[in-house]
Amino acid sequence: MRTWLFMLASIFFAASISFSQSTKISPVDLVNPLIGTASKPSLSTGNTYPAITLPWGMNCWMPQTGKMGDGWAYTYDADKLRGFKQTHQPSPWINDYGQFAIMPITGKLRFNEDERASWFSHKSEIARPYYYKVYLADHDVTVEISPTERAAALRFTFPETEEARVVIDALDKGSYVKIIPSENKIIGYTTKNSGGVPDNFKNYFIIQFNKPFANTTVWLGKQLKADELEQKGDHVGAVVGFKTRKDEQIYARVASSFISAEQAERNLKEIGNDSFNVVRDKAKAVWNKELNRVTAEGGTDDQLRTFYSCLYRTMLFPRKFYELDASHKIIHYSPYNGQVLPGYMFTDNGFWDTFRAAFPLFNLLQPTMNTHIMEGLVNAYKESGFLPEWASPGHRDCMIGSNSASIIADAYLKGVRTGYNINTLYEAILKNTETEGPFSSVGRKGAVYYNRLGYVPYDVKINENAARTLEYAYDDFAIYQLARELKRPQAEIDRFAKRSQNYRNLFDPTTKLMRGKNENGTFQALFNPFKWGDAFTEGNSWHYTWSVFHDVQGLTNLMGGQKEFIKMLDSVFVVPPVFDDSYYGFVIHEIREMQIMNMGNYAHGNQPIQHMIYLYNYAGQPWKTQFWAREVMNRLYQPTPDGYCGDEDNGQTSAWYVFSAMGFYPVCPGTDQYVLGAPLFKKMTLQLENGKTLIINAPANNAQNRYIKALTVNGKLYSPNWLSHKELMKGAQLNFQMTDKANTQRGTKTEDFPFSFSSAKE
């Protein structure tokens, strides 16, 4: 019997694959928003939540399994839902702000999050970027959600009952609700946040039902206020009741605003009189328009689902933090000074992660959006005096570096130039290079030491000093590139060119690795290259040594030439996944994720080493990049709840996959070049925003054929290990001949190597 069932299941599975390959499925329906949700603090497989939203939408909606305030608000292994939450969370470590929850129930009146919770099953759950549906077993209610940018449509299908209810939880830390029975409406606000907000911060919400209330109540803390319609306090909420027929659907339109209650009502016009199905269909169309910028063909079902799921994740952050006033002018509540001001604003992004590939992807596929983001950075600088490095919604003290320089320089140098004042941004960049900000993540921590010594010392009580030095040096290169383009004074250009070489100050020739250095010029004692943290950020010396994005040839020379450089690259995968966690005092999740992936000391689950695979191109062995890029895509990404190998981090880990599947990667933002890997699919078509088309053909691609035998660009044989952004943006056709054997002759000449500062200066 079991054999027969297994055969039947195999036939069904094969048929489903055949169907999906031969039937046109819209790309948004290939997306699985549940990827990465099987996570917890001790082990991240993405640390994501199912974001039901539009691209870069101001609000996301999500089912909530965790308790109020828990950063892990939805975890795949949970079996109960406590509500459906409007969320703005960019990361469980940063947590949420401006959130509130809605929960339909039946039976006796209860509002506490544990008492109202219901069992659910993933078997009765549908999750798409534009649509979420689930059955609440304890209440016999089906919930559906579809989004607009600042509003959402919620539909509740109730059983026949006189005790159908909807609970509105404005959460703690200060909230307000008011029921308006004559308008079937609830208004209110939540102030719940995790930091980075001005004193007057509020998220105002409005909930408009399509049916009169049979009964109402409000609550404060644990106490019901049955005879009242309005309540304000630390933790308040409301419950509205209905009498429903079997399968009667209650339709709730919800919107919010960071500006005012009146603006929240204005934002509700994004839905207007649209039915739930119309809202859903419009949201689906928006996602398909964006996802259809890239058409992938000729991969497996898993590869297609992984690719489009990753592409979806790249379009969630940074979040729009602006609204349209009565005259349809763009305005925003400033998360920096609390004023309502004209112009764009974006938030919820950690540039330490996203400068590497997420923002370069915008410059390739979404340059207009990046123009708006650049204007938002201008406004953030004007309103706070500093460029944001980790904003949620205002400045947050998290991570290191001043990588806003990379993001700004890369955008401008790749042609994203209209709609914002680059001179204001350059002024802000210069300020960063000389100034420590109000938080260690803003400006440059240790700037005085760095500018005087050429490095941030190990022994002056500035943590992660070596990582700061390496990132500052790269950012100085980006500034140098931008300064040249802006025709700044030569002395200024020369200053940043010189500072870009500060990485050399930390290179230890005895170990061929980067190492912390004391103020007196001696290296740190008791150096363990496997020690995480300390001189480095969420990594060790084996990970951070490669953070010389702009001068790989210079690093190669320091290591003793190409042979030694390749040996050191190979060693990352050869050495066992040993680690020293003494700096933290416990095994942080990033360490554990490296340990269990069985790829030596390669830690793809965290950002510092994600470009390292592509560095073989700089030393004449590009076939090793081709091997390892495919290996990482095959082994470390899956379209499943545990589908990532670490934190997804605002689209960065997803952008790595998107670029790598295309066959190239932006190792050094701030240059014109993408470094070659090898494409994943048989064909990819990119519809560029300027109307041009980029076609990537690799007809022989399959599981075995991961190596490039030959490449032609626009019909001409092409030997370099890099591609020009400028040329790709003109439209191009790349034809890859793929094979199962490494071509050890192609890309081995120094003239084929990608850009390095040292080579360019020679």
Image: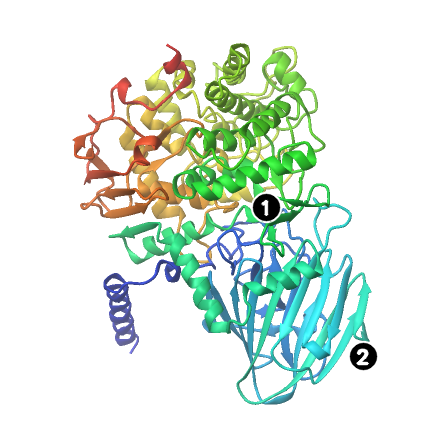
* Circle 1 residues within 10 Å: few <14, some 14–19, many ≥20: many
Q: Which mark is residue 348?
A: 1
Q: Relative to 642, is 224 on the left or the right?
A: right
Give the vertical position of 245 relative to 428 (above or below). below
Q: Quadrant of residue 267?
A: bottom right
Report the residue marked by disc 2: 226
Asked whether the viewer can see residue 597, the reply is no
Name the residue type under label 2.
Answer: Ala
Q: Which one is earlier in the sequence, the residue at label 1 or at label 2?
A: 2
Q: Relative to 146, is 89 on the left or the right?
A: right
Q: Relative to 757, is 507 on the left or the right?
A: right
Q: Are marks 1 and 2 in contact (CB under 8 Å)?
A: no
Name the residue type under label 1.
Answer: Asp
Give the vertical position of 721 relative to 358 (above or below). above
Q: Which mark is residue 742?
A: none
Q: Position of residue 681 (x, y in %)?
A: 27, 47
Circle 1: element type? loop
Q: For marks 1 and 2, give the CA distance.
A: 38 Å
Q: Position of residue 605 (x, y in %)?
A: 48, 42
Q: Quadrant of the C terminus?
A: top left
Asked whether the viewer can see residue 682, the reply is yes
Which of the two residues, 135 or 413, is positioned nearer the viewer here? 413
* Circle 2 residues within 10 Å: few <14, some 14–19, many ≥20: few
**For the point 39% across and 59% down, which residue is it?**
28
Which of the two residues, 460 or 151, is positioned nearer the viewer here? 151
